[in-house]
Amino acid sequence: MKYRKHLVHISVIAFAAAGLSACLGSTHVQAEPDQQNYTEKIPGTTVSFEMVAIPAGEISIRGKSIPIKPLYVSATEVTWDAYDIFVYKLDDDDDTPNSAADAISRPSRPYGAPDHGWGHAGFPALHMHYKGAEEYCKWLSAKTGHTYRMPTEAEWEYACRAGEKEVTGKKLSEVSWFGEEKTHAVGKKKPNAWRLYDTLGNVAEWAMGLDGKPVVCGGSYKDAPDKISPSSRAKQQFSWNTTDPQNPKSTWWLSDAPFVGFRIVRER
């Protein structure tokens, strides 16, 4: 992947941990009353995931100052446990059918073993096309009654940084997987200051770019440490889908991009 980085200034105007007030370089952190994290259970299944409340604030990217609304952000990358329900219609036994969810397009079944034998339960979903991630959000919203969506590039970086400038050296190793040959189960490294896991490394994560085009953020398991950063970006390349036998290429799966996944957000 070809990554680019940009200089960033973050101004956080609220912080989710009560009683905390500090200055971190040019970042000002102020106290905010505790916001309630919650666990979402996908109806008709035993699968659940945690959503973490993060505060409102502001971030400057490429010279543009962008306000950030209060958000819920998934604590981890979306796992196979959750994505399989969407792909394989494992919610068909739900006693309360949802016509809105049933009407949403679902991806074709992936080719071969999409997890490469690296691990499935508790591991991040791989080979994600942005369309697949976006349609998953629509399906999940219809299933749960909560409006989930993909993060914007600004929201993603703001959540990843969690009030910090850069993460380097020993701390980078504590919070991210990089320079590896495969992905790892989510949530096995330390979280960032806002209790989000694996925002750096493991799988790069989709977001909607400032230019209105999808971009993957943060770097992945296979990247060198200098490519693992809140400001690392990569656009989809032809090489990410070279071996896809379909013509035209699939808009659901990226056959040659096991390093691409996603996480979701919800406004609060």
Image: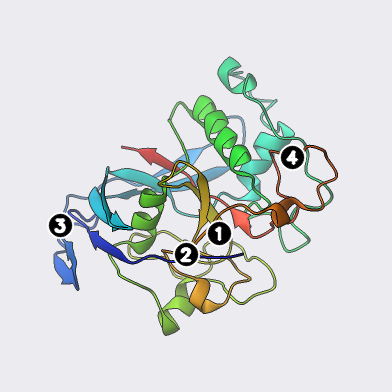
Residue identifier under label 4: 250
Q: Nearer the viewer, mark 2 or mark 1?
A: 2
Please say if the residues under marks 2 and 1 sit with CB atoms less than 8 Å apart: yes
Disc 3 is placed on an element classified as loop
Circle number at residue 87 = none
* Sequence-first tag of 3 and 4: 3
Provide the secondary structure element on which disc 4 rests.
Answer: loop
Task: Please provide percent x and percent y for residue 181.
Answer: 69, 73
Determine which quarter of the picture holds residue 145: top left
For this rendering, which residue is in front, 129 or 84?
129
Q: CA distance from mark 4 to mark 2?
A: 26 Å
The structure's colour scheme is rainbow
Q: Nearer the viewer, mark 3 or mark 1?
A: 1
Label 3 CA crowd tier, 10 Å (few <14, some 14–19, many 20+): some
Q: Earlier in the sequence, mark 2 or mark 1?
A: 1
Q: Residue at x 71, y 61 (%)?
A: 119
Identify which residue is drawn at 33% across, 67% down: 7
N-terminal-most mark, 4 or 2: 2
**First-in-chain label (4 vs 1):** 1
Residue receiving disc 1: 204
Mark 4 vs 2: CB contact within 8 A: no
Percent position (x, y) of residue 185? 61, 63
Categorize mark 2 by other alpha carbons within 10 Å: few (<14), some (14-19), many (20+).
Answer: many
Badge 2 is on which residue?
Answer: 232
Which residue bears the numbered disc 3?
31
